[in-house]
Amino acid sequence: MQVLSRLFDRRRRFDDISVSIQEHIRERAEELIDEGVARDEAERAARREFGNVTLAQERSREMWNGPRWNLFWQTSNSLFVD
């Protein structure tokens, strides 16, 4: 059961990363809107300023798990994919 617990805890941390990134982008968009930028443009600008979301997620995961664990995780997942 400890393995499952760690797996779900890890997944929760990864979800937390995604939520945190989206909150950051949303907050920046709101700042731009408060400055008078139209909502559509503010959302685009906030995403553009933040940069590559996928890359940020991957880097955050690497910092938490280290490159070896990330490689192990990717390799072990490929064993279960059709």
Image (cartoon, grey):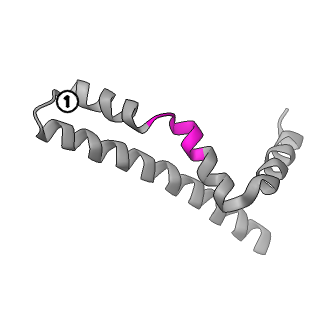
- Residue under label 1: 39
From what the image shows, is residue 63 above or below residue 37?
Answer: below
User: In this orientation, does residue 1 appear?
Assistant: no
Q: Who's the residue at 20% across and 43% down the image?
A: 31
In reply to whether residue 36 is colored magenta, the answer given is no
The main secondary structure of the magenta stretch is helix
> In the image as oriented, which residue stretches furthest toward the bottom?
2
Is residue 26 found left or right of 15 in the rendered image? left
Q: Which amino acid does label 1 sit on?
A: Arg
Q: Which residues fall within the magenta stretch?
A: 51-57
From what the image shows, is residue 16 above or below residue 29?
Answer: below
Q: Who's the residue at 20% across and 37% down the image?
A: 32
On the image, the x and y values in percent for residue 11 come to: 63, 57
Is residue 28 found left or right of 1 in the rendered image? left
Identify the image quadrant of the C terminus: top right
Q: Who's the residue at 71% across and 62% down the image?
A: 7
On the image, the x and y values in percent for residue 25 come to: 35, 42
